[in-house]
Image (tube, rainbow, N blue to C red):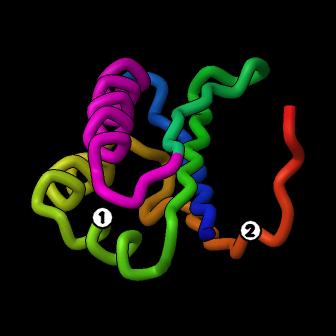
């Protein structure tokens, strides 16, 4: 299982537009085959900061996600809305999961 973590900081005047696009990406991603979890989180100390976390069954489904037309269209719109592009994106292999 793989986990992706992307960090964005919106330009303050574009925060709501970036949130709108991020939520559309969440909805799209959750419907994809192999997506186990996908969420968007807003920093409680700085509302301009967003964190997007996804869990995927394997590398192939993650690559399909990145290559999907809807992903490409949504993410292409992020560039003008964020302080720094491209954003910080990290990929992890999940070695253990706590049960809640």
Q: Position of residue 84 (x, y in %)?
A: 49, 56
The kind of secondary structure element at disc 1 is: helix
- Please check the rendered image and state whether residue 93 is part of the magenta-colored stretch, yes or no: no
Q: Position of residue 22 (x, y in %)?
A: 37, 35
Residue drawn where x is 61% and y is 57% of the image? 5
Q: Nearer the viewer, residue 87 or 51?
A: 51
Q: Is residue 80 visible?
A: no
Q: Residues within 10 Å of mark 2 (few under 14, many from 20)?
A: few
**Distance (Cα) linking label 1 and label 2:** 18 Å
Q: Nearer the viewer, residue 31 or 7?
A: 31
Image quadrant occupied by the C terminus: top right
Q: Position of residue 43 (x, y in %)?
A: 70, 27
Q: Which residue is mark 1?
A: 65
Say whether marks 1 and 2 touch (CB < 8 Å). Answer: no
Q: Is residue 95 visible?
A: yes
Q: Which residue is mark 2?
A: 94
Specify whether 61 is left or right of 55: left
Specify whether 98 is left or right of 2: right
For the record, the magenta segment spans 14-36
18 is higher (above) or lower (below) than 30: above
């Amino acid at each position: 299982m793989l986990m992706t973590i992307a960090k964005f900081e919106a330009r303050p005047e574009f925060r709501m537009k970036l949130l709108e696009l991020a939520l559309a990406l969440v909805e799209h991603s959750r419907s994809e085959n192999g997506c186990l979890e996908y969420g968007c989180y807003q920093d409680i100390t700085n509302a301009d900061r967003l964190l997007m976390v996804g869990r995927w069954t394997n590398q192939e489904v993650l690559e399909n996600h990145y290559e999907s037309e809807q992903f490409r269209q949504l993410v292409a719109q992020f560039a003008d809305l964020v302080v720094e592009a491209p954003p910080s994106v990290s990929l992890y292999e999940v070695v253990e999961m706590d049960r809640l």
